[in-house]
Amino acid sequence: MTGVTPTTRLRIRAEALDGAHAATDLRDRFVLPSGVTYLDGNSLGALPVGVSEAVTDVVRRQWGTDLIASWNTADWWGAPTRVGDRIGALIGASAGQVVCGDSTTINLYKTVVAAARMRPGAGVVLTDPDSFPTDRYVTEAAAADAGIEVEYCPPDHAPARIAELGTNLALAAYSSVDYRTGELWDLPAITVAAHEVGALVCWDLCHSAGVLEVDLDAHEVDLAVGCGYKYLNGGPGAPAFLYVARRHLADFDQPLQGWNGHATPFAMSPDYTPAQGISRARVGTPPLLGMLALEAALAAYDGVSMAHVRARSLSLTAFFLECLADLEPDLVVATPRSEAHRGSQVSLRHPEAFGLVQALIARGVVGDFREPDIARFGFGPLYLTHADVLRAAEELHAVLAGNEHLRPEYSTRAAVT
Ligand SMILES: Cc1ncc(COP(=O)(O)O)c(C=O)c1O
């Protein structure tokens, strides 16, 4: 379009893209403050409509009126597997293989120890040196407890290293999407490589559950973990989930033996016998307020296919990259431009990334900062439009044009960045 300013061109593009994706615009399933463009769904998802009411009902009626009876009448006891199945539907797991509960950290501990026990004689768990720190910390702790070694290898070199390790590999434990750069790693290739040497895989789905087609069953993944508070929108501190492929359930010997994972919990037996099925991954009494909030939040996905969610997510992130290329072509984009390698996030590297994010928040565009120089923008596909994306890019342009990111008031760090 000759004679048209970049802004006008991008506005026309945003309108056209929003028109083309109108069927997957689920903004009205969320409660978002006006004037805010929320690009932090990769840290804490937005509040879905109906969650407040559901939690109020849990507190007032199920707890306040029905009291202890709700363990049966509201099936509180069955919530971990019921909510697990609902999450499973979003990550390509058929029923009976996902349990909701604990945190990603704790679930990863269970899977690493269980994998070492399932592959006796193999001495190594392979993982990403740039994993989210908790993954490193807990993998080291679990490996030490299980008597195996941790070896670090970037995901793009993992298939070759897995082949070298051969039968000495017990487990390859990787994140499907890099939390800093938003890079989508090759889950099928790493999974196949691990299986070729008889090893297991565990995928951390924190940054993929709810935004892309993970297809755990189709790729014959062995184990997976992930959290409920990011793109699944379960709320702050929402419980996590754990997937164990059906073929491994009988052998899934996880180390945290608790009464909720017992075969007959109310027999009050002094000895531990694991439950049949995925319930053996349970530990203690689940945090029901959070779990039932997550269950209500998952209704935002009702009737939505993950293929459509992924298509919308890719369109949003691609359009953000297009806007940046037009408005701020010198910015360093840390996220791969190829769709096959991009999660639902765009990260920028900038020497003043912290100030940049703070200045944007002051303008109503909420992203976050990760050390050392990353400004992260996570795109919750259900509640964002291409018009939101353009607004974010325009505000970014305005911040940089006015050097707002250098203002002293934007350099103070709170406890959570
Ligand atoms: C890849 C990854 N794993 C794990 C976690 C957090 O684990 P937890 O839910 O135990 O705090 C995060 C949090 O951002 C993450 O990005």
Image (tube, rainbow, N blue to C red):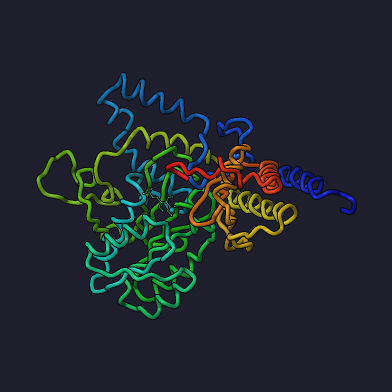
Residue at image point 41% right, 24% down: 56
Percent x, y for residue 8?
81, 45
Residue 22 appears in the figure = no
The extreme bottom residue here reads 164
Q: Is residue 288 above or below residue 17?
A: above
Percent x, y for residue 167?
31, 77
Q: Quadrant of residue 361?
A: top right
Is residue 129 toward the left or the right of residue 265 in the image? right
Percent x, y for residue 399?
67, 45
Residue 109 appears in the figure = yes
Q: Is residue 219 above or below residue 262?
A: below
Residue at image point 74% right, 45% down: 14
Is residue 389 toward the left or the right of residue 232 in the image? right
Q: Quadrant of residue 130?
A: bottom left
Is residue 4 toward the left or the right of residue 101 in the image? right
Residue at image point 36% right, 55% down: 134
Q: Is residue 322 above or below residue 188?
A: above
- Seen from the viewer's position, the closer of residues 367 and 268 is 367
- Seen from the viewer's position, the closer of residues 158 and 408 is 408
Percent x, y for residue 273?
17, 51
The extreme right residue here reads 3
The extreme top residue here reads 65
Q: Quadrant of residue 284?
A: top left
